[in-house]
């Protein structure tokens, strides 16, 4: 009798564990085939992600990060007024509104480097770029030799060689 009760309790415990775990959101999955997923929580923008790679999903099922299957143009700011093309076969991360937080650009691009959108620099194709919410670059690899401010007062500057990875303060100076 004690053995039957113990088995019953184990079965109930396993059933509860299954019910609880099946109600949790999937955090990461490896895709068996290319698959299209929403990239924003409003479920209005989608992208195709590459088979054999991981995608990280938010609780609502939209993608937080994953490897895109083909070159794709995505917004880089929450206002959806600026976009860039990102390289197939590379990982990208998305904000809940669907704009790119970071990704590998498909061609050289000129992006704003300050939040006021008054300064820009050109970034190298095939390299990752990280963006702030309003679309300015947080970090990226310079495509050309570039003179940049090195302090927040903008009283000092330095010359940075093409291929240098730089991180910017919100004012556009190099951190």
Image (cartoon, rainbow, N blue to C red):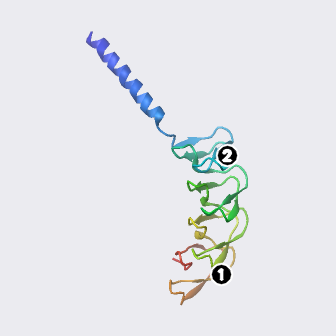
- In this picture, residue 27 sits left or right of residue 160: left
**Residue assigned mark 2:** 50
Q: Does residue 59 lie above or below 135 as drawn?
A: above
Which badge, 1 or 2, is on the more N-terminal residue?
A: 2
At 34% across and 16% down in the image, what residue appears?
8
Q: Position of residue 71 (x, y in %)?
A: 73, 55
- The answer to which of 66 and 114 lies nearer the viewer is 114
At 67% across and 46% down in the image, what residue appears?
50
Q: Position of residue 144 (x, y in %)?
A: 69, 77
Q: On residue 43, which mark appears?
A: none
**Residue assigned mark 1:** 146
Q: Does residue 117 lie above or below 98 as drawn?
A: below
SS state under label 2: loop
Q: Position of residue 76 (x, y in %)?
A: 63, 63
Q: Does residue 105 lie above or below 24 as drawn?
A: below
- In this picture, residue 11 sits left or right of residue 64: left
At 50% across and 83% down in the image, what residue appears?
152
Residue reaching furthest to the left: 2
Quadrant in the picture for the N terminus: top left
Q: Position of residue 78 (x, y in %)?
A: 60, 62
């Amino acid at each position: 009798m004690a053995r039957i009760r113990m088995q019953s309790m184990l079965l109930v415990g396993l059933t509860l564990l299954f019910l609880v775990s099946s109600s949790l959101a999937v955090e990461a999955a490896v895709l068996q085939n290319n698959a299209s997923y929403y990239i924003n929580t409003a479920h209005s923008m989608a992208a195709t992600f590459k088979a054999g790679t991981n995608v990280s999903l938010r609780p609502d099922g939209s993608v937080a990060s994953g490897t895109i299957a083909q070159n794709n143009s995505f917004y880089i700011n929450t206002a959806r007024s600026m976009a860039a093309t990102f390289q197939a076969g590379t990982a990208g991360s998305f904000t809940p509104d669907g704009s790119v937080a970071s990704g590998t650009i498909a061609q050289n691009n000129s992006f704003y480097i300050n939040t006021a959108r008054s300064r820009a620099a050109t970034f190298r194709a095939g390299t990752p770029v990280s963006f702030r919410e309003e679309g300015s670059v947080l970090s990226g690899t310079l495509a050309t030799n570039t003179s940049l401010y090195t302090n927040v007062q903008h009283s000092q500057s330095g010359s940075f060689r093409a291929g240098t990875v730089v991180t910017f303060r919100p004012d556009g100076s190099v951190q």
